[in-house]
Image (cartoon, rainbow, N blue to C red):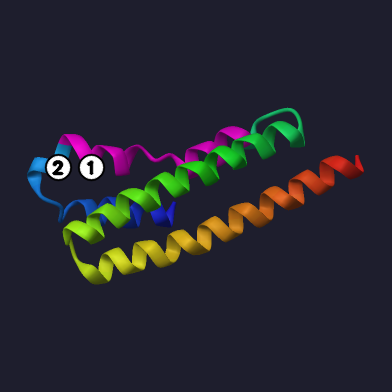
Amino acid sequence: MDLTDMTFEFCKELPANERYNLIDQINRCSVPSNIAEGSGKNTSKHFAEFLSISISSSFELETHLLICERRKYGSEEKLRNCLELLSEVQRMIFSFREYVLKAEAIS
């Protein structure tokens, strides 16, 4: 959720002409929503699938942020902070997914 808050704040600084393109794409990356949806599934295997989708969404978000970097959109500091937190979140989700899959294999 912190990552989502941070990226929404970053998007406020992007050019208005990106409102229906890049900004919407960034805001639709549903990293925490996929985790939340997966947590309500009946099996660990299904939860792990949603964690995989969340990881995929995080890489989509990363790509959009790197496009902002290349186009020199927004605050460099806010962008760097978003990318750093995103990298941490990606590692956390990947590790959690591995844990869930191991727990499923043991069951």
Q: Could you tell me which residue is drawn at 38 percent across and 63 percent down? A: 83
Residue at the bottom extreme, as displayed: 77
Kindly state the secondary structure of the residue where label 2 is placed.
helix
Q: Residue at x 62, y 34 (%)?
A: 38
- Describe residue 10's horizontal placement relative to residue 95 as left or right: left
The label number, if any, that marks residue 22 in the structure image: 1
Cβ atoms at labels 2 and 1 below 8 Å apart: yes
Q: Residue at x 14, y 42 (%)?
A: 18
**Does residue 73 show up?**
no
Q: Position of residue 74 (x, y in %)?
A: 17, 60
The residue at the far top in this view is 42
Q: Residue furthest right?
A: 106
Amino acid type for the residue under numbered disc 2 = Glu
Using the image, determine if residue 98 lies above or below residue 70.
Answer: above
Q: Is residue 100 left or right of residue 107?
A: left
Q: Main secondary structure of the magenta part?
A: helix
Total labels: the figure holds 2
Q: Residues within 10 Å of mark 2 (few under 14, many from 20)?
A: few
The region drawn magenta spans 20-38
SS under mark 1 = helix
Residue sitting at 17 percent across and 34 percent down?
20
Q: Any magenta on residue 36?
A: yes
- The answer to which quarter of the image holds residue 91 is bottom right
Name the residue tied to disc 2: 18
Q: Quadrant of the C terminus?
A: top right
The amino acid type of the residue labelled 1 equals Leu
Q: Is residue 10 shown above or below 56?
A: below
